[in-house]
Structures are given as C-alpha cells and as structure tokens.
Amino acid sequence: MLQLTQSPSARVLASLEESYERCRQITAKYSKTFYLGTRLMPEAKRRAIWAIYVWCRRTDELIDGPQSEFTTEETLDDWAAHLESLFQGQPLDDLDVALVDTLQRFPLDMQPFCDMIEGQRMDLHRSRYETFEELQLYCYRVAGTVGLMSTVVMGIDPAVNTAPWMQAQPLPNPAEEAIALGIANQLTNILRDIGEDAQRGRIYLPLEDLERFNYSEQDLFDNVIDDRWRALMQFQIQRAHRFYESAESGISVLSPDARWPVWSALILYRKILDVIVENDYDVFNRRAFVPKVRKALCLPKALLRARVS
Ligand SMILES: CC(C)=CCC/C(C)=C/CC/C(C)=C/CC/C(C)=C/COP(=O)(O)OP(=O)(O)O
C-alpha cells in the first residue's frame, strides 16, 4: 500500500471553517472591545475582520509575545516573505487559511500589512520617541494600518453622494478618518499601558512633551503623580480626543451595516480616556478599563449615532 508520509510543509491545513473559528476565538480572547464591535457586523465582514485581527496580533506578538526575545530583523523579513505568500494565495499554517480566503473576497492592498511590519521594526530598535511626529508615524504603522484594512472589508456606502441627476462619482475614500481612528485607539492604548511599558523600559510619550511639562523620565519610572503629571496627561488625552473627533465624519460614508460596530468601538475605546481621568491619571497602579455594564450602555448610544450621522 502506498505510504502517505507528509513533510511538514505539505501537512494538511485546517479547513476554512476551523481556521475562521480559531480566528474568532483569538479575537474574543485578546480584544474584548473590538470583538464586541465585530459581533454587530454581518457574518462575512466579521469573519474577515477576525482573520485580519489575528494576522495583526501575530505580527504584534513577534515584538511583544513570549518568543519576542528571539525576534530579530531577520524574523521580520521572514514574516514579510510569509505575507507575500499569503497574497499569492498560499497559506502556510492553519491561521493563514482564513486570511487567504479573506484576501480573495475583499480587495485588500498589501501595503498596510507591510507598513505594520515596519511598525514592529520600529519597536525592535527604539524605546523612545523624541517628537509627536515620530510617534504618529509609529501609531499609523501599528494601528492606522488596521483602520485602512478594516475599511476595505466594511465597504463604502454606494448611496453616498449620489442622486439621479448627478454624474457617476467615484466613491469617497475615508482613508484619513480610518487612519485617525487607528491612531486615536493607539494613543489611548499607550496612555492606558504607560505603567506596564515603563516596567519594560519603554516610554511612548514623546520626550518633547515630558520636557514641556518639566516631568523627567526618572519621574515616570518612579511613578510620580503630581500636577506636572496631571497636566501632561491632560495634554495627551486632549490630543487623543482630537483624533477621535477627526475620525467621526468618516463613519457616515461607510456601508450602513458597518456604522454601528464602528461607532461602538469608537465610543467604547474612547471611554478608556474617561476612566483614566476618573482614576486621577494613575496609570501606574490601576489599569483603566470600561466595566461590562457601562459597555452595554454605550451600544444604544452608538446605534443612535449610526442612524443619525
Ligand atoms: C472611521 C472609519 C472611516 C473607519 C473605521 C476604521 C477602523 C475600524 C479603525 C480602527 C482600527 C483599529 C481597531 C486599530 C487597532 C488599535 C489598537 C490600539 C488595538 C489594541 O488592541 P488590543 O491591545 O488587542 O486590544 P485591547 O485594548 O482590547 O486589549
């Protein structure tokens, strides 16, 4: 009888269903807020978002995960080559199966995926950002890119800007708003995780801002909470709010079935900023999170915004 031995590369991969299910589980486990948002989307779109989330998570894990001490430039080069293979329709492992399917269903561009790998490369080399401009580039790469990817899946409302007497117009592209929401989320994430990052010797707050408020790196490592810190944090929080605000107008051009999920994710994630204020800016000893009941109360508010704007 013919012996069917499999080399590792020829091993049978997970079925499409299994792969999407694993992506769902991973998204649910790691990102409660965004998972909740996807639950409000139609099936085909939410599955695609899970597949993308998992790829982003795996990219992030190369720098932040348990194996990260072994990550080098070469690891990231290999991951970029792995990405090429996915865009050529060739899954290499079980989790890839869902993403390859998603890439076939939605016209996703490879550039934001490559940009995200470059964002991880920044994390590999640096633990400080001098200016906000530098930090903004990092935020675009690791989170603004997710906004661009998600927009393609969620789609644009074909009814936007059209009327029978108008010439056919190209669909609007809310790329800037999508990037702004990703950056707003990342800035929020940075503020929430300041304590945790400091323990790893990392500071994502721009050093020019620390200087402006006369607050030193040592103060940060000593977890000093005083008026200088509060003023510095208020400044950062206002900046994040401005990014949320500039994202808002983009939501109304998204496909109607995506507006409620995006408004929900925006409102829920923005709430973390309010919790930081309620915690008197103590991001060193307390993790700012939005309790489940408060989250649930945001959903009708998000639905209303989705309907009226
Ligand atoms: C506004 C328009 C036009 C489109 C919306 C485009 C979208 C969905 C933008 C959001 C992009 C996004 C989800 C970026 C990820 C940012 C981020 C900081 C994620 C943090 O994720 P985790 O750390 O896994 O989650 P938790 O914070 O829940 O632990």
Image (spheres, rainbow, N blue to C red):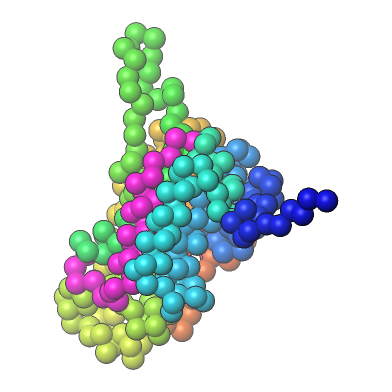
Q: Position of residue 197 (x, y in %)?
A: 39, 78
Farthest residue to the front: give it: 1
Answer with the quadrant where ligand 1 appears in the image.
bottom left
14 or 178, which is in the foreground?
14
The magenta span reads 106-132
Q: Is residue 146 magenta?
A: no
Q: Position of residue 173 (x, y in %)?
A: 34, 34
Left or right of residue 205, residue 6 in this image: right
Tell me which residue sits at (33%, 66%) in the image: 121
287 or 98, which is in the foreground?
98
Farthest residue to the top: give it: 165
Tell me which residue sits at (39%, 83%) in the image: 200
Tell me which residue sits at (31%, 47%) in the image: 246
Left or right of residue 107, residue 95 in this image: right
Q: Position of residue 68 (x, y in %)?
A: 45, 75
Q: Position of residue 44 (x, y in %)?
A: 60, 38
Q: Is residue 72 visible?
A: yes
Rendered position, 196 above or below 188: below
Q: Is residue 277 visible?
A: no
Quarter of the image where the C terminus is located = top left
